[in-house]
Amino acid sequence: MRTHREIDNRSLAMARAIAHKIDADPRHGGLDHAREVCRRWNRKRSSPAVSEWLEILAKPWDEVRSILLDEGERGKRLRQSSPFVGILSNRERWHIYLEHQAHDQN
């Protein structure tokens, strides 16, 4: 069974991979994708987390990136409801899962 710390570390690794992928795209298309996901979530069922993400995603990428990668409590909390789903491929996600599974077992 994973501890909260292990899950938070894996979530941060995913966020780093997402940020790297968006950084590599001059158009930052992943940010547009996250905005659309968040708008869709808001239409289906609004929540405080979705509202907070909507506010964050209205900011420039550099600010969003900083919040996404925040290692503090706010960053941990926000990554639990991240609208950046679908940015990483299944293969990229599984690589991170396997990497952290191996690390957690050591």
Image: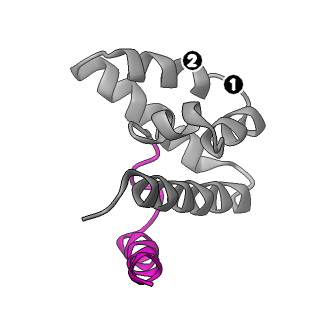
Among the 4 quarters of the image, the one containing residue 16:
bottom right
Q: Residues within 10 Å of mark 2 (few under 14, many from 20)?
A: few
- Asked if residue 71 is positioned above or below residue 38 in the image, the reply reads below
Q: Which residues are magenta?
A: 84-106
Query: Disc 1 marks which residue?
Result: 59
Question: In this rendering, would 52 be left or right of 16?
Answer: left
- At a point 46% along the width and 73% down the height, the residue shown is 96
Question: In this rendering, would 3 be left or right of 106?
Answer: left
Q: Residue 93, image x and y in percent?
A: 41, 69
For the C terminus, the image quarter is bottom left
**Residues under numbered marks 1 and 2 in contact, where contact means CB atoms less than 8 Å apart:** yes
Query: Disc 2 marks which residue?
Result: 55
- Asked if residue 45 is positioned above or below residue 36 in the image, the reply reads above
- At a point 32% along the width and 28% down the height, the residue shown is 40
Q: Which mark is residue 92?
A: none
Name the colouring of the figure: one colour
Q: Residue 58, image x and y in percent?
A: 62, 22
Query: What amino acid does circle 2 point to?
Result: Glu
Query: What amino acid does circle 1 point to?
Result: Lys
- At a point 47% along the width and 55% down the height, the residue shown is 11
Among the 4 quarters of the image, the one containing residue 7:
bottom left
Q: Residue 99, image x and y in percent?
A: 46, 80
